[in-house]
Image (cartoon, rainbow, N blue to C red):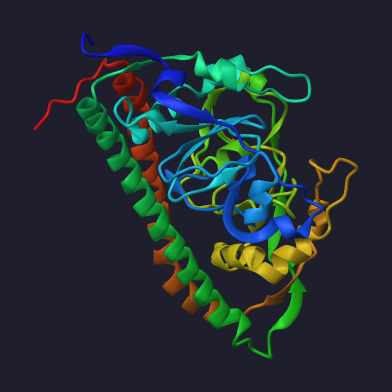
Amino acid sequence: MSEWKEYKLGEIAEIVGGGTPTTSNPEYWGGDIPWLSPKDLTGYKKIYISHGERNITESGLMNSSAKMMPKGTVLFSSRAPIGYVAIAKNPVCTNQGFKSFVCRQDKVLNLFLYYWLKNNVEYFQSLGTGTTFAEISGSAMRDIEISLPPINVQKRIAGVLSSLDDKIDLLNRENATLEALAETLFRHYFIENPNPAWKEGKVSDVAIHCKESINPQKHFDEIFLHYSIPAYDNGKRPIEEQGQSIQSNKYVIPQNCILFSKLNPHKDKRVWLILDDVQPNTICSTEFQIVKPQNNQWLYFLYEWLIYKENYDEIASGVSGTSGSHQRIDPKVIFENGCPIVDEFTLEQYNTKVKPIFEKIKSNQQRIETLVIQRDMLLPRLMSGEVKIIEQ
C-alpha cells in the first residue's frame, strides 16, 4: 500500500454534469448525438455503453446545459437513483441525473475508476441529500477521497475484474442466442404451423394458479432463497435471506413453474422460468404469480406462450391502478389468456428439441452466478489493496 496515494476525485478527473433540451421543441430531438438518462442504465450489465433510448440534435446540445463528453468518460448517475455506472463507448451527453468523470489519464485509468465507483455505491448513496429524491452535488463529489495505486497496478486490477465481466457478458450473449433459438422453435410449431384440429382453450385449462403462502418471519432463523423483483432485475439472481429479515408473506415456489410479474408488466417484462431443482424454503414475492402446468410436458410451451409478444402485450394491457409507477394486472388475466390445446405428440416433439436449450441456459446462468460471486468477492479486496496481483 506504500505506493498508493490519496487524492480527491476532483483532482483526478473533470466532473461534468448534464442537461435536458426542452422536450417540447422537436428541433432538439431525434438527431445523431447520443443522450442518456439514468433510465438507460436500469438493469444494464455491460461496462461500455454507446447510446440510450433517445438522441438529441446539435441545436438541442447548444441550447441546453448538456455537454458533449469524450469516449472513455465514466458515467455515474448522481440521482434517481444514485449509483449506476458505465463507460462511454463513444462521445455522448447525458441529462442532469449524471455526474460524469473525464479522467486525467496520468492519474487514473477509467476502467479502474469504473470498478472503484461500483465498489463504493453504498457510500455514495449515504451522501445523497434532497427531499424529492436523494442527489449528490458536483461539489460534494469533487471532495470525495480516493486511494490510487500506480497506473500499471490499476491496469492489472482492472484487467482481472474485466476478464470476469467479459466471461459473464459472453455467457449472457450466449443465453440471448439460445432464447432466440427457443422462440424460433416455438413459432415454428405453434404460430406458423398450427394444427386446425387443436381446440381453442385458456391457460387455465392446462395450468393452475399456485398461491401457497408462507410468513418467513415465523421461521426466524431459517434461510430462504428469495425470488424477488429486484433479484430478477439483478440478472435473475435470487438471494439467500434469513426469515427474520423478510417482510410480509411470500409464495412457496414449486418445481417446474413460471413466475409472471403482475407489477408494471406494460413497462417491465418479468417472466421467470423455474425448472426441477427447486430447494426447500424457495419463495417469491407476491408480485409474482405462479403458473404451474398441470402436466410438466406443458412447461416450455406455456413459458414461450406467455412471453410471446402478442400474448404478453395482451396480458400487460390489462394494467390498472391510480399510481403511474405501481400499476398491476389482475392475475385472472394471465389464466384467461387464450391458448391452443395442443396434442401430446406435437408437445413431445417440441420438448425433445427445446429442452436441451433451456437446460443449457440454466447451466450458463449457474456459471454466471459463480463468476459474479467471484468478482464481487474480489472487488473490495483489490480496490483496497488487500489482495495484490503479481506482475507476470
Whether residue 384 is situated above or below residue 270 in the rendered picture: above
Q: Position of residue 89 (x, y in %)?
A: 43, 49
Total marks in image: 0
Whether residue 158 is situated above or below residue 221 in the rendered picture: below
Q: Nearer the viewer, residue 64 or 356?
A: 64
Q: Nearer the viewer, residue 276 or 308?
A: 308
Residue in view at x 33 percent, y 27 percent:
108
Does the image show residue 220?
A: no
Q: Position of residue 245 (x, y in %)?
A: 61, 19
Residue in view at x 50 percent, y 40 percent:
237
Whether residue 353 is situated above or below residue 106 in the rendered picture: below
Q: Nearer the viewer, residue 235 or 261?
A: 235
Q: Residue furthest top?
A: 2
Residue in view at x 86 percent, y 40 percent:
323
Q: Nearer the viewer, residue 337 or 113?
A: 113
Quarter holding residue 343: bottom right
Q: Quadrant of the N terminus?
A: top left
Does the image show residue 20?
A: yes
Q: Residue furthest bottom?
A: 196
Q: Residue furthest right?
A: 322
Q: Position of residue 187 (x, y in %)?
A: 57, 78
Residue in view at x 21 percent, y 13 percent:
3
Q: Is residue 5 left or right of residue 316?
A: left
Q: Quadrant of the C terminus?
A: top left
Whether residue 162 is situated above or below residue 210 in the rendered picture: above
Q: Is residue 55 left or right of residue 316?
A: left
